[in-house]
Image: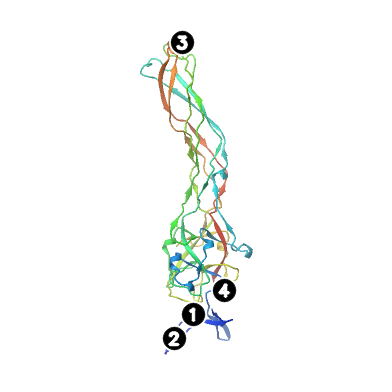
Amino acid sequence: MYINIGGSWIEPLDVQVKHADAWKTATVYARLGGAWRVTHQGVPANMYVIYPSAADVVSSRMGTPVTALYGRFPRGTALSAEIGTTYSAAHDGAEHGSASATTSEHYNAVDTENYSDHVPYWKHTHSIPAHAHSGVVNIDPPYKNVCPCLGADQIRNGALFLSKGAPTAALVAYAAALGKYLRFAADGSTGGSSTHTHSWSGDTGSSNWTSNSGIDEIYPNVSMSFNPFAHAHPAGHSLAAASNLPPLRKLRVLQWAGGTTGSIHNFPSGTIAFFSTAALPLGWSRYSGLDDYLPYGADSDVEAVGGATTHTHAAQGCSTGVSPSIIKTNYAATMTLIPALNHTHTWTDSHPAAGSSWPSWVKLYVGVKN
């Protein structure tokens, strides 16, 4: 809508009407060709106007930051009853189940300086215990923090909107969100990771060396016996890395550059916004593309989906730490210390159960400009 002031037509910053002793931003209609059309549409009180950080919200007219949403990723819903419901992630490695106990046998052929003419073979077996990789880890995917505000009656430069359309002169590309999920917070920082793992700390438990009886390359009829030498190996390890990416919908993240405005009427088709209730402004429809998806900043393949609700960690080969040892022999009725070779044990570790890939989220209603 334009008004003529001093011979010049200008678009008013705001149009307000007084109702119950309070001034409220108005939606203005004009009759054109026999039909009533919206010429000025105020910012709906239930629309989340998002800014890069709380520091950018410098006026109460820009809305109030909704701190209750901080630390959560916005997720769309079709159900009014679900609006505002939350989930708090606490991904525990125990979700992936326990690995079965396994054994690992090791043979050492030892040729020492003092016993170069005798090559005894020492063998022993260790048990890697059944275990789970318990403990909560952070599975936030790569994110860009943004600040959600409610109750705005003005939109100022810097406000962020999602879009399935191309940038315009008034809504320009916001490069800081490319390749990142949107996450609500006060600051505008980035964080998260595309993968994660889980660690376990333990050992093999104690095992003794034993010898093959009757093996002596010089004196095959002489039995070489070895006193047991108990030792253990550290067997702690991490699972193979798995994806951190929950279900995503690629959308453009655009930044308002059209100057301070009290109207959303001239927003381009395809602009997407979050709402705190299921009441959408005139000219907007429910956007189902974010139902059970999280928005992900992109400038190509817009509206393509990716990610997954669950993840697994692949089985992997593992190796114990090195355990040095010394063996006592009573060969020739003597007691002599013989250094044994340092060694490790290997095995395959598998925790095949699926775990959740969802970070902490809040469900919101999503609208798109027609």
- Image-quadrant location for residue 116: top left
Q: Amino acid at mark 3?
A: Val
Q: Nearer the viewer, mark 2 or mark 1?
A: 1
- Identify the secondary structure beneath mark 3: loop
Q: Amino acid at mark 1?
A: Asp
Q: Nearer the viewer, mark 1 or mark 3?
A: 1
- Image-quadrant location for residue 6: bottom left
Number of other residues with Cα within 10 Å of mark 3, as a class: few under 14, some 14 to 19, many 20 or more: some
Measure how far apart labels 2 and 1 are at the Cα level.
15 Å
Measure how far apart labels 4 and 1 are at the Cα level.
17 Å
Measure how far apart labels 1 and 3 are at the Cα level.
104 Å
- Residue that carries the numbered disc 4 in the rendered image: 281
Measure how far apart labels 2 and 4 are at the Cα level.
26 Å
Q: Earlier in the sequence, mark 1 or mark 3?
A: 1
Number of numbered labels in the structure image: 4
Measure how far apart labels 3 and 2 are at the Cα level.
113 Å
Q: Amino acid at mark 2?
A: Trp
- Identify the secondary structure beneath mark 1: loop
Q: Nearer the viewer, residue 95 or 25?
A: 25
Residue at 54% over, 51% down: 357
Label 2–label 4 contact, CB within 8 A: no
- Residue that carries the numbered disc 1 in the rendered image: 14
Q: Earlier in the sequence, mark 3 or mark 2?
A: 2
- Residue that carries the numbered disc 3 in the rendered image: 222
- Residue that carries the numbered disc 2 in the rendered image: 9
Residue 121 in picture, x, y percent from top left: 45, 20
Whether residue 206 is situated above or below residue 23 in the rendered picture: above
Q: Earlier in the sequence, mark 3 or mark 4?
A: 3
Residue furthest to the right? 81
Q: Nearer the viewer, mark 4 or mark 1?
A: 1
Residue at 54% over, 33% down: 129
